[in-house]
Image (cartoon, rainbow, N blue to C red):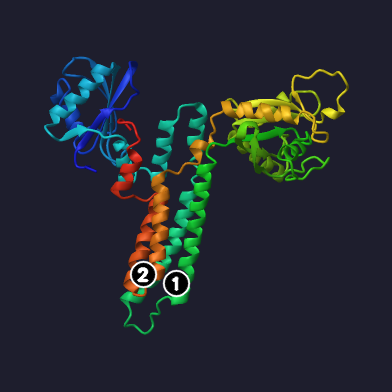
Amino acid sequence: MDAERTIVAVASPPGASARGIVRTSGPCAWTHVRAILADSDALPAQPSRGVIVARLAAPPIPVMIVSMPGPSSATGEECVELHVPGNPLLLERIVDAVVAASQGGARRAHPGEFSARAVLSGATTLADADRVAHAIAAETDAQLEAARLLEHDAPARAAAEDAETLAGTLALVEAGIDFTDQEDVVAIPRTELARRIEALRGRIRGRLASEHGSGRAAGAVRVVLAGEPNAGKSSLFNALLGHVRAVESPQRGTTRDAIEEAITLPGGTQAVLVDVPGLEEATEALDVRMQVRTAAALCRADVVVWCDDGGEVGGDAMRTAGADLRNACILHVRTKCDRDVPGEATTSIATSARTGSGLEALRSALADAATRATPKSSVAARLGSARAELLAEAERALADAAGETAPELVAANLRIALDRLGEVAGAIPPDDVLGRLFAHFCIGK
């Protein structure tokens, strides 16, 4: 990736708008921008961070310039933005003018190159860039919410922990190589080295298997059973599954954590059914943590089954759920309908976990809702092929290290595995990995 020249591109969305943005980044970014401005001699040779109001030389219209000197910029380099009326033709003319005035010092940016430079400079991590890629690809509010959920990057944290363990093992192997003539320096015993390598390989294989499983389940919607305590959620959960998975009790607060189980709905639709603690005002520390778990499950829900056993919809509890349910499909279910007064009208789906009444109607309603929902997990579960490949390469390097006898070759393979784990954890990856990731970005990103 050529990082020696300034890059320039339109950074605002396509089409006409009140304001458009042309972004530049790289060495001499301000110099190249300054060359297309009227009265450039009156402008500072190197502006500080801030906003400058000037005029374009052609066409002679006002322009607002945002100066962001490196390294404290979005890309870690000198970054300059021109804010002008959002006419697509005007924006392209400005890009052409900057490239022409630079006399070879600037060029048009490639897709994702601004984000790639941010990663290379250390201004952001690969995991952050991955979230940007998912946000760019999002087509609905639910997918945008899923991109936000990638903030909790558990695979990167796990890879960082493994990298730290491997770094210690590699240091012992290299110490045995460097100080082989010193009697007081003892290299790591072969049996201990083999044990450590196999343990790391096992953890990596487990994460790869989990990743493949997540990919297969990416199309599954999340159906969360919610409501006030003792509203019959756990009983309905077990009834829909067809076997006992959650503890049922007339005592309030029996469910203490979110319980998940895969389920196949009518028509073969795959879903993940989730039972959560009942929603109520929490005062004790344990109750507060239970409510936090419930709110988190509701934030990830594609379909919410709101359970109520008293004829009321439960609006007050829904308003205090602490979760944004605007992007979720909500089904209102009347549980324990076997206790209803004959002839009593209800606007909810009436069900009874004890008699099985209404369960098929609820399953059909869930299948219909699931076909209309865009699973948030379809975005959140994707780590990207590049990261999965890096994990696989780390596992193969560890396998090669385990099969070597020469300490130098063992160390070389451990170093390869350490580099790959570091890349998964957010370290600077090689150019080919960057290319695979950033090829899916917009030009101005």
Q: In the rendered view, does 322 fall on the left or right side of 422?
A: right
Q: Residue furthest left?
A: 103
Q: Are marks 2 and 1 in contact (CB under 8 Å)?
A: yes
Nearest the viewer among 64 and 444 is 444
Image vertical order of residue 386 relative to residue 375, above or below: below
Res 130 quadrant in image: top left
Extreme-bottom residue of the structure: 183
Tag 2 residue: 410
Query: What number is the disc on residue 150?
Result: none
Q: At 82% across and 31% down in the image, what residue appears?
A: 336
Residue 319 showing in the rendered view: no
Regarding residue 35, the answer to whether it shows in the image is yes
> Which secondary structure lies at badge 1?
helix
Quarter of the figure that contains the C terminus: top left
The disc labelled 1 sits on which kind of residue? Leu
**First in sequence: mark 2 or mark 1?**
1
Residue 83 vs 220, above or below: the answer is above
Q: Position of residue 305 (x, y in %)?
A: 68, 30
Question: Which of the pair 12/336 is nearer the observer?
Answer: 336
In percent of the image, x 18 and y 27: which residue is there? 98
CA neighbours of label 2 inside 10 A, class few (<14), some (14 to 19), many (20+): many
Residue type at mark 2 is Val
**Residue marked by disc 1:** 193
Look at the picture and state if 177 lies above or below 371. Answer: below
